[in-house]
């Protein structure tokens, strides 16, 4: 009977260690994952329209910049990229390509980790 309790305790400890490792690796992944980077293009004056998404995609593609998505959203054109490097290159290309009258701004997408920090009442800028 003692052997049975010892094996049961050992399994429970191993299960707990495995669970803790899974939780720790999930938190580590969420903390180190690079979020999508996003550019927003909006008209500088009220009443003007946003640029055509296909026009923007064509110029970015011609310059070797890969786009994840282009979506119109509330009189803004939201463009998502895989990395900050692509986003910065796209901002340079679009500043030179688009006619004057558009504002191009970067927008950092929140990560799932940021969501949990906000729920805990911690600002991501206060960490690190």
Image: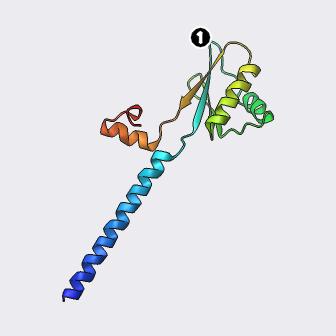
Query: Residue 62 appears in which quarter of the rendering?
Result: top right
Q: Is residue 116 left or right of residue 31?
A: left
Q: Quadrant of the C terminus?
A: top left
Q: Nearer the viewer, residue 50 or 89?
A: 89
Residue annotated with mark 1: 46
Q: Position of residue 95 (x, y in %)?
A: 71, 20
Q: Quadrant of the N terminus?
A: bottom left
Q: How many marks?
A: 1
Q: Is residue 9 left or right of residue 106?
A: left
Q: Is residue 46 left or right of residue 89?
A: left
* Residue situated furthest front in the rendering: 128
Q: Position of residue 29 (x, y in %)?
A: 48, 51
Q: Position of residue 108 (x, y in %)?
A: 53, 32
Query: Residue 106 appears in which quarter of the rendering?
Result: top right
* Rendered position, 18 above or below 106: below
* Rendered position, 16 above or below 94: below
Which scheme is used to colour this image of the protein?
rainbow
What residue is at 21 percent from the left and 82 percent from the top?
A: 5
Query: Residue 86 appears in which quarter of the rendering?
Result: top right
Considering the numbered disc 1 on the image, is that residue within a helix, a strand or a loop? Answer: loop
Q: Nearer the viewer, residue 22 or 115?
A: 22
* Rendered position, 62 above or below 45: below
Q: Position of residue 23 (x, y in %)?
A: 38, 57
What residue is at 31 percent from the left and 76 percent from the top?
A: 11
Q: Residues within 10 Å of mark 1 (few under 14, many from 20)?
A: few
């Amino acid at each position: 009977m003692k052997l049975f309790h010892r094996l049961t305790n050992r399994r429970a400890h191993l299960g707990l260690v495995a669970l803790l490792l899974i939780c720790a690796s999930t938190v580590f992944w969420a903390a180190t994952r690079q979020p999508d980077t996003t550019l927003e293009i909006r008209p500088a004056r009220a009443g003007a329209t946003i640029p055509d998404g296909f026009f923007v995609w064509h110029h970015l593609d011609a310059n070797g910049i890969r786009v994840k998505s282009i979506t119109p959203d509330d009189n803004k054109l939201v463009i998502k990229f895989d990395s900050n490097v692509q986003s910065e290159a796209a901002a340079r290309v679009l500043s030179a390509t688009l006619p004057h009258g558009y504002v191009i701004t970067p927008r950092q997408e929140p990560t799932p980790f940021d969501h949990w920090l906000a729920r805990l009442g911690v600002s991501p800028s206060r960490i690190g």
